[in-house]
Image: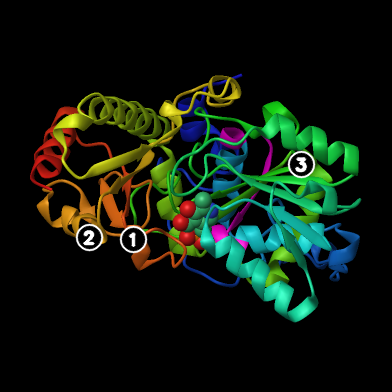
């Protein structure tokens, strides 16, 4: 099987419609029907799932368009299954919840936006939300949502454990692997039902587009998701799909560099923590001792880590002492970011800073953090 970079550059070649080496940007929202009346078919109900918007002749860009189908082809190869692309990570999560339609969802801490979607469904339709330590409250058809590594600490959860429990109950497993996309980890090694990513992060990689993915091993399930997406109105937009394709060409180089660099930085900070007067904690998968971590993070650790300083003011002041880490939310881009997490996540400690490592020179990033932490 070709490697990730080969697929990133060539997996969509079979969908090429022109002689251009680089796919053109298609801005049209609507596409001409065939000239031959024999080729013009009446609509089918989406419930019949006979129409695959991602492989059929395009009709309307909310259903599918040339670059969204190319993106799905590449991301399917990278994520190891049949991929459906969305216009954000949260759209992908919402589509997964609409698909599984659970009465109860078990969820850990993780990204607050996913919790907010569940709270909306709790308020409107009585969805029950329980913790990952309350699996005894799940029944057949319910859902276990595992974010691993988990935002903002990059703590790894044992996917195998939750899959075993889910199978005993007859529940489904959805893994949000945004913090460790392949080759760092592959949740399908553990037989999960579905994997989601905020593709805004490492797949997009340049902090200039929003997208999300759902990947499944089951082609019929992919068809169902793709058939419902036009009615959720959540396909990736035309320009973003082009940008995503361009980003994916360099994806493997970026993710490997970001992961290696983050692990080196965490090691350095951990070894020198006595020189930093206000640093109280460092959180990262590379510092986690559980036996399952190495097996699950088979390709390297998450490129995100978090630190805690002794007071909220010290934490809030650290970003302005840094040269190469911009004070902003999000992660996964080529530029390193640091965020006083309380700005966007009401549940975060005010002592917490989340760091997203970009692709700058690792020694420069270490020197920058070292100098700022010595002054803090
Ligand atoms: C782990 C995780 N899942 C989902 C999302 C939502 O993704 P998006 O911002 O693309 O909607 C994020 C965004 O930060 C995230 O960090």
x and y, in percent, of residue 273 in the image:
22, 31
Sequence-wise, which precedes: disc 3 or disc 1?
A: 3
Q: Is mark 2 within 8 Å of ligand 1?
A: no
Residue at horizontal 55 percent and vertical 72 percent from the top = 29
**Pointer 2 local density, CA inside 10 Å: few below 14, some 14–19, many at least 20:** many
Q: Are marks 3 and 1 in contact (CB under 8 Å)?
A: no
- Residue 226, quarter of the rendered image: bottom right
To which residue does mark 2 refer?
A: 316
To which residue does mark 1 refer?
A: 350
Query: What range is drawn magenta here?
Result: 77-91
To which residue does mark 3 refer?
A: 193
Q: Is residue 131 magenta?
A: no
x and y, in percent, of residue 70 in the image:
56, 47
Labels 3, 1: front one: 1
Q: CA distance from mark 1 to mark 2?
A: 8 Å
Q: CA distance from mark 3 to mark 1?
A: 36 Å
Q: Secondary structure at mark 3?
A: loop
x and y, in percent, of residue 359 in the image:
26, 36
- Is any atom of residue 347 visible in this view? yes
Residue at horizontal 39 percent and vertical 66 percent from the top = 344
Labels 3, 2: front one: 2
Q: Secondary structure at mark 2?
A: helix
Q: Is residue 195 above or below residue 29?
A: above
In the image, is 295 to the left or to the right of 248? right
């Amino acid at each position: 099987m070709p490697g990730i970079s080969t697929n990133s550059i060539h997996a969509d070649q079979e969908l090429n419609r022109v002689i251009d080496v680089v796919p053109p940007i298609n801005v049209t929202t609507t596409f001409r029907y065939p000239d031959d009346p024999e080729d013009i078919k009446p609509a089918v109900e989406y419930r019949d799932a006979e129409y695959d918007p991602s492989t059929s002749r395009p009709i309307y860009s909310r259903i599918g368009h040339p670059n969204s189908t190319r993106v799905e082809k590449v991301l399917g190869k990278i994520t190891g299954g049949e991929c459906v692309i969305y216009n954000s990570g949260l759209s992908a999560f919402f589509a997964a919840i609409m698909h599984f339609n659970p009465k109860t969802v078990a969820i850990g801490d993780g990204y607050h936006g996913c919790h907010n979607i569940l709270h909306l469904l709790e308020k409107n339709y009585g969805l029950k939300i329980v913790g990952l330590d309350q699996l005894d409250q799940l029944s057949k058809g319910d859902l276990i949502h595992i974010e691993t590594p988990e935002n903002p600490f990059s703590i790894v959860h044992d996917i195998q454990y939750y899959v075993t429990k889910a199978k005993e109950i007859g529940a489904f497993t959805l893994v949000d692997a945004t913090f460790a996309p392949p080759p760092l980890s592959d949740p399908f090694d553990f037989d999960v039902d579905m994997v989601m990513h905020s593709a805004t992060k490492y797949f997009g990689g340049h902090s200039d587009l929003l997208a999300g993915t759902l990947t499944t091993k089951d082609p019929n399930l992919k068809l169902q998701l793709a058939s419902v997406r036009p009615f959720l109105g959540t396909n990736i937009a035309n320009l973003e799909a082009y940008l995503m394709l361009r980003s994916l060409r360099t994806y493997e180089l970026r993710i490997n560099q970001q992961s290696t660099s983050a692990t080196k930085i965490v090691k350095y900070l951990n070894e020198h923590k006595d020189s930093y007067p206000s640093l109280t904690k460092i959180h990262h998968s590379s510092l986690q001792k559980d036996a399952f971590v190495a097996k699950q993070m088979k390709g390297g650790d998450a490129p995100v880590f978090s630190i805690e300083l002794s007071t909220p003011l010290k934490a809030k002041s650290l970003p302005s002492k840094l040269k190469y880490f911009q004070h902003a939310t999000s992660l996964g881009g080529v530029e390193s970011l640091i965020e006083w997490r309380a700005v966007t996540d009401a549940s975060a400690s005010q002592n917490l800073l989340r760091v997203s490592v970009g692709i700058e020179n690792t020694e420069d990033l270490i020197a920058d953090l070292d100098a700022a932490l010595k002054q803090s």
